[in-house]
Every structure is written in structure tokens, then in C-alpha cells.
Amino acid sequence: MSVFKTILNTIPRPILIKLSYWVRPIISFFLKGNNYTDPIDGKNFRTFLPYGYGIQRPNVLSPSTLSLERHRLMWLYLKNETDFFTKTHKVLHFAPEQAFYKRFRKMKNLDYTTTDLNSPLADVKADICNLPFEDNSFDIIFCNHVLEHIPDDTKAMYELYRVLKKGGMGIFQIPQDLSRITTYEDNSITDKKERAKIFGQYDHVRIYGRDYFDKLTSVGFEVNQVDYTKQIAPELVERYRLMKGEILPVCFKNN
């Protein structure tokens, strides 16, 4: 597993994405088993791979889809609790995750647009704080593990609100330490190793606390804090390797 750790955490993301298309089938073959299931593609494995910056989380990265706990949780929520897979939707997806990108792209019911400043999977290169889209453009927006990278996250949230249609839904996941009441950030910390130690990654600018949901509400969203693992049988939470207690921030624009 040490080789996998090195590959997943040191190779630049664009190169890793290209390599993964031929590496994944090989890894999946050697890890076949019946202990764990990736609900995104239904494949079974004796173990998942480790993943994480600094401290490694064991048994969390699916060998087949490269999904992590948060991706599998969102997939299950969308599949079981929404009409995402059955109704027509215009979707905006920030920094599209590889676990989702090809699947969402192939869905005939979706008018699917991806955006990011750096991702090789982005259709539109754009700054989240200054989006090139009209007001009320999208039915659904996914913006997961992005806002912790953005210095002016308030402006980014207002842009998300602006381009979401009235009645539309957004899922805006973040790295979570919800034992914290308030968000912590300190721009005076510039050393990358120190930032990684404090914020989890060198390119994160804050650690969100529970006030994250209040901030989204102040922008105008109706925010549902969905602990979807409570609605899944405990044995499936373990089999799918979900993070028990992880909150899905499911946001709606009602005005």
C-alpha cells in the first residue's frame, strides 16, 4: 500500500487523472473481494485504498471509481432522495470529481456543464467569485471541497446563489470538523508545511466550523443539514465505507 500512498499523494492531479484510466482496472483486479462495495458502480473489493494528506485514512478510496466517503454519500443521497437521475436538469459542477464526471456526462436527462480554474475536466475555465453565467441559470449546482480553497468565500457563495435558479438545489460539501463552533482562518500563516498541519492541506485557507451553515443561510440559501448516514443501515455504512455522521449541506434557493 505504500506505493499507492506515494502515487495518490505526490503526482500532480492532471497527470494522476490521465494515469488512472489504465491503472484503475489493474488495481481493481488485484483487490477483488466481497468485504466492501462501491455503490457508484456496484463493484466489490476485499479492501479499499488508503488516502489523505499527511494522516492517511485507511480503506477509503475505491479502486474502481476513485470515490471517497463523501462521493459515495452524495451518490446515495442523489439516487435515493432526489429526482437527479430521472428528471431533466441543467447542472453546474465545480471541479468535477472523477468518480462522477463521465457518469454525469453520459446521462441523457442532464444538461451538464463543468467549471473550474485548473481542472482538466472543466468545460468552462472560470473564477467562482466572478462566474460567466446569467442569473438563475442552473437547476442543480455541485460545489464540493472547493470553498475551503477560496479566500473570499462569501463572494463565492453569493455567486453560487446568483446563478442557481429559484427552487434549485445545491450541494456544497466541505472538509468537516463540526466539533468546532466557529470557522478558523489565519492568512499570516504562509509556510506550506505549517498550513498543511493546521488546515489539512497547504492550499486550504480555513477550517470550517458549524457556522458554515449559518453563513450559507445569511447569503440567502435554505440549508438542510442532512446526516444521511443515519438513514442507512449501519452494516451498509461500513460496507460502503461512509464517514458516519458526515453532514451533507443541501441548499435551496427559494426566493
Image (cartoon, rainbow, N blue to C red):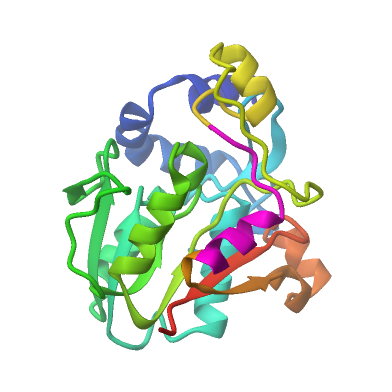
Residue 39: x percent and y percent?
A: 57, 66
Determine whether 13 is above or below 222 in the image: above
Tell me: 203 left or right of 137.
right
Seen at 53% across and 44% down, the residue is 63
Residue 201 horizontal side relative to residue 180, left or right: left
Instruction: State the image quarter where residue 59 is shown.
Output: top right
Q: Quadrant of residue 132?
A: bottom left
Is residue 92 part of the magenta span, yes or no? no
- As drawn, the residue found furthest toward the front would be 218
Whether residue 128 sits left or right of residue 149 in the image: it is left
**Residue positioned 73% across, 69% down in the render:** 229
Instruction: Point out the stretch of residues depicted in magenta.
Output: 205-218
Residue drawn at the location 64% of the way across and 39% of the way down: 207
User: Residue 8: x and y, percent?
Assistant: 51, 28
Along the viewing direction, whichever of 231 and 93 lies nearer the viewer: 93
Instruction: Give the percent coordinates (x, y) of residue 85.
Output: 39, 81
Which picture quadrant has residue 56? top right
Q: Report the front residue among 133 and 99.
A: 133
Residue 212 visible within the image: yes
Residue at 56 percent across and 39 percent down: it is 30
Compared to residue 7, the image places residue 216 above or below, namely below
Q: Quadrant of the N terminus?
A: top right
- Residue 146 visible in rendering: no
Q: Nearer the viewer, residue 210 or 228?
A: 210
Picture coordinates of residue 45 (x, y %)? 63, 51
